[in-house]
Image (cartoon, rainbow, N blue to C red):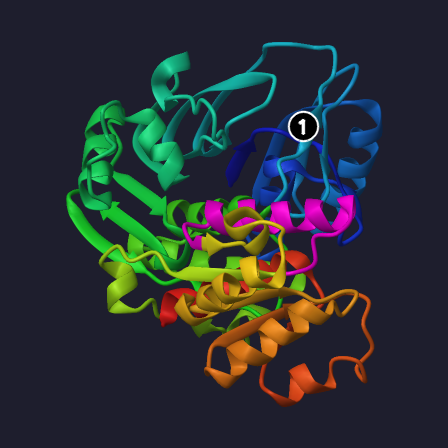
Amino acid sequence: MITIVGGVYRERCMRPAWDDIYGSAGRAATAIARFGGKAELQAYVDSTSEVVLDARAAAEGFQFNAVALKEGVTFEYIHGLSTPDIRRGTQRNSMLQINAEKVLRFGMIDGTAVIEAKYAVFDPQNADGPESFKANGSKAEHLALVLNRHEAHQLVSDSRDLSPQELATALASQEGAEVVVIKMGPLGALVYDKGSISHVPAYRTKRVWKIGSGDTFAAHFALGWMDSGLSAHEAAANASIATAFYCENQGFADPALLASFNPEPLQPSERYRNGYSPMVYLAGPFFTLAELWMVGQARRDLLSMGLNVFSPYHDVGVGSAEDVVEKDLEGVRDCDVLFAIGDGLDSGTIYEIGYARALNKTVVFYAENESKQDVKMMEGSDCRIIDDYVSAIYQTVWEAVEL
């Protein structure tokens, strides 16, 4: 039995449309139970969330122990890569006390969980100020940390110049952890296990449902490492594939579904592994406020993924043909991949796409509202045509890092 403790929150997303009650702990309980593991969820919930989770626990086969909360927390997303608007309840600094043999603990928005366990997996889930596992008095005989590289740097002081291997080693020593798993985006995950270092790949998927992907990874890692007797490397490898299934299907795998799922491992190029940041040309109209917002959003998301971005609006500006055209075309020539915002079929954007394809540049064409007839030329010239924004951003990253 794995005891799961953390947040249960309402999640709402505009594109693609989503409105459900999961949160990190609620999602992990479903992921583990769906895969055949025994799980017990302990969380603060309001009355609405309790009804939903009671029904889900009965359907999925996990135990649910609710602690009453007057008002819950809601995460509001524009899309899966956006920074959510967090609507908090009135209760503050709640504390759960957990004593169990195996515990999966997540960081929480308005409180913490003090645990005492034989085995524990901890995912801090906080980009701004992740909490040390032992800061609140939590104890575990065998501890594994699962976190991303940014959270790892936040936890270890003066760590900016450390390699991922050095960062994992420092974190293990600081936190008293046997295992540290650092998720590193396209580079997959680094696994530190009692001094030994290994890596597991990330995977390409047809689509990317980002919300909850980290929860799914932590859940499957915990199930493999604490419950199934797998090594840390094996558990992380299984978790990476299960997370790819979740991202592609916006749902949870059972053993049979995962056995038949064969995603393509991402294979970053040597130059990317050696620190090269690929250049993406951001093509799209910027003549209305909505268009400017979309260009700015895409630029921020691509930059946050570690890519360099050439944006005609930001890097050249608005001007006459003599002022801007040659500079824009030079940007296309110098880029590794072109990301095109295609809705509206802006003439300048279409020209940039054609120029890029004539130079044999990879083009990712994002459009939600154009007909198959209208994108026929892009399809026929081997552009990657995608109608989901987050999936298009990830496809751009994957194409860029493999060059």
Q: Position of residue 167 (x, y in %)?
A: 23, 37
Q: Position of residue 197 (x, y in %)?
A: 19, 51
Q: Which residues are magenta?
A: 284-308
Q: Position of residue 1 (x, y in %)?
A: 51, 41
Q: Quadrant of residue 366?
A: bottom right
Quadrant of the image containing the C terminus = bottom left
Which residue ends up furthest to the bottom in the rendered image?
Answer: 380
Q: Is residue 288 magenta?
A: yes
Name the residue that disc number 1 marks.
65
Element under disc 1: strand
Q: Main secondary structure of the magenta part?
A: helix
Q: Is residue 181 visible?
A: yes
Judge left or right: residue 143 versus residue 165.
right
Q: Quadrant of residue 141?
A: top left
Q: Position of residue 242 (x, y in %)?
A: 51, 60
- Amino acid type for the residue under numbered disc 1: Asn
Residue at the image position 66 percent from the left and 34 percent from the top: 84
168 or 81, which is in the foreground?
A: 81
Residue at the image position 15 percent from the left and 43 percent from the top: 195
Residue at the image position 54 percent from the left and 54 percent from the top: 311
Mark 1 crowdedness (10 Å alpha carbons): few <14, some 14-19, many ≥20: some
106 or 140, which is in the foreground?
A: 106
Up/down of 145 relative to 286, above or below: above
Up/down of 281 relative to 30, above or below: below
Count how many numbered circles sit on residues in the image: 1
Q: Is residue 8 magenta?
A: no
Q: Is residue 253 visible?
A: no
